[in-house]
Image (cartoon, rainbow, N blue to C red):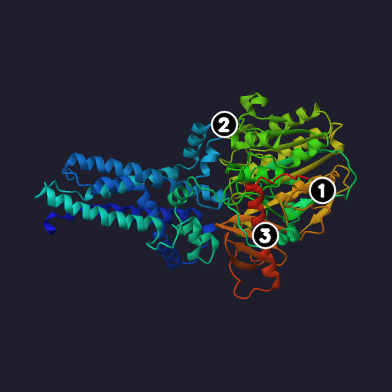
Amino acid sequence: MFRFFRLQEYKVLFYRILLAYVFYFLARVGFFIYNYKLLKVDSVSEFLTLSYHGLVFDTTAILYANALFLLFSILPFWTNTTKGYQKFLMYLYFTCNLVAYATNFVDFIYYKFTYARTTIAFMDIVKNESNKGNMFFRFIVSYWHVYLLFFIMAFLWVYLYKKVKIVPKKPISKSGYFISSIIGVLVIATLAVGGIRGDFKKSTRPLNIIDANRYVEKPQHADIVLNTPFAIIRTIGKTSFKKINMVPESVVEQNFQPIKQYRNNPKTTPNIVLIITESFGREYLGAFNPNSTIKDFVSYTPFIDSLAQHSMIYTNAYANGSKSIHGMSSVVAGVPSFRDAFTSSPYPKQKIQSLVSCLKEMGYDTSFFHGAPNGSMGFLGFGNILGFDHYYGKTEFNNDSLYDGVWGIWDEPFLQFMKQTLDKKKKPFFSTIFTVSSHEPYVVPKEFAGKFPKGTIPMHQCVGYTDYSFKKFFESAKKQPWFKNTIFIITADHGNITAYDEYYKIINRQAVPILIYKPDESLKGEVHDLAQQIDIYPTVLDLVGYDKPFRSWGRSLVGDTKIIPYAINFNGNQYQFQRGNYICTFDGKKITGYYDKNDKGLEKNLMAHPNKEMLAAGQACEAFVQDYMRRIIDQQLYYKK
């Protein structure tokens, strides 16, 4: 019977699949080398242990990528061993494998911006960009070494594949060959199903991204265990938006009061200018790092530092997401994004109470400015859902000579365009601008070459340029009659690549500034309490005396004493909830850790001995996620009487 088995073919098939494991390991090594400061691995043995645990996730990705190749390798065709058929198998093998394998290399760079393995949600970002070809070319120029490394790996993989060949051989008996092949198909198919699921237990659901956290003590190590093809495959056609029921509704109300009503201030109608600054992490601003213990700390924002002396600033504020579109929904609508962007979920097309809707009720003209090609980042679509009266993008600017060639119009001229547009607006107005220049590929206009400190990372000169752009905007705006009756708010969508170890720590990766400036300086000071992007929405409504009930998970930063200051975001496949003396982590089903509030790297888990305050923070985190999911899925993002 054994002479009918296709032992030669099975041995070579095993070798070819084994090659995939080898190259996935090499990709994991590359991912670690490019991101070692973020991943914090203490030793070679620790990395190898994480890689060992990653084998189960590699297995799933490899089997998915090689499904067709495996099928055509084991089907009982009489011509399987011929040169022509083997050539077909080679092309099929590398077409499927290299497409999947390339996604690992995306995260060599992209991980620095999102702090998570790339998922299918990435496509929701890319599809909104009209200049994909130009952006791709710029990425090749900026990150040529990653592309080169990928092609070296690909050529080496092809070389090793060809080293072991199948000798053409006709079956001795077609019936014996067919019967033995069926046995082989059944065995290999069974193993493949188990490999894709993660094991053979019927009671166990298939492996998912969150399962990587079972093998790690530090949350960021889950991204070493994972691989990018797995993260993409497991999120295709799926959403993390699911209802949970973990705590009574009274706990939600007690901790967050999702329906708020403020009557702290008389109703007024000052103009509101809200500036969401691209990638402007807190670490770049001297005013937001008072008495910094960071060695050799340098500020790159002289103008904002000077403005901060006349403003109310929040030095312990955090973003509620990791991408630009997360920032827009968090700041303007008070709707954060966690594993998946709310705007990319099945649920954004609903009535959403926000700064736009509430201020329009008060007679405000509302507008959104973004110097990128119209529709970029999904801002135009989401802006239409929120109900902005006007959208001003690259099209309305109408001067491509000031286009940076990648993202949009340079900040300085586009901020001037915004100012000129506001000069003509009916008062009061609420205007939001999302800047573009403080972004990869980290360049400034040619005429400003050498004007700003290069610092220690490429981002620093871009921060200097955007800060200068703000300076010119405020200088021009001061000359206008509307300026004195305007509240200015400056924040960021998320953080960026850091130069300091302190900001590499998991919690601090999403540290952003929040600044509120009133020209009469009636609001002035420095606040160290926790704050977050979703607090901006209720804060503005409190300041203008909006006295109707509204939906918000945030709190007014200038008058809400009922809600304990807190901040929530998502990293390492877990929710991170800061409140009081502790940080809590939650995987969506159970609390996974408690940490001291100063343990920003989440290095010492205190879960073995929780105290009353820890448990209360954990329950509050569960309550937030529960209410967040319920209101989004049940379309309750607008207060209904």
Q: Horizontal and vertical percent for residue 140? A: 46, 38
Q: Horizontal and vertical percent for residue 387? A: 71, 34
- The amino acid type of the residue labelled 1 equals Ser
In the image, taking residue 2 as reference, residue 565 lies left or right, namely right
Q: In what element is the residue under mark 2? A: loop
Say if residue 305 shows up in the picture. Answer: no
Q: Residue furthest front?
A: 641
Distance between the alpha carbons at the discs numbered 3 and 2:
45 Å
Q: Residue at x 74, y 44 (%)?
A: 490
In front: label 3 or label 2? 3
- The amino acid type of the residue labelled 2 equals Gly
- The amino acid type of the residue labelled 3 equals Ala
Q: Is residue 281 above or below residue 423?
A: below
Sort mark 1 into few (<14), some (14-19) or many (20+) by Cα contacts within 10 Å: many
Q: Horizontal and vertical percent for residue 17? A: 30, 53
Q: Is residue 503 above or below residue 618?
A: above
Q: Which residue is mark 2?
A: 405
Q: Which residue is mark 1?
A: 311
Q: Nearer the viewer, residue 479 or 618?
A: 618
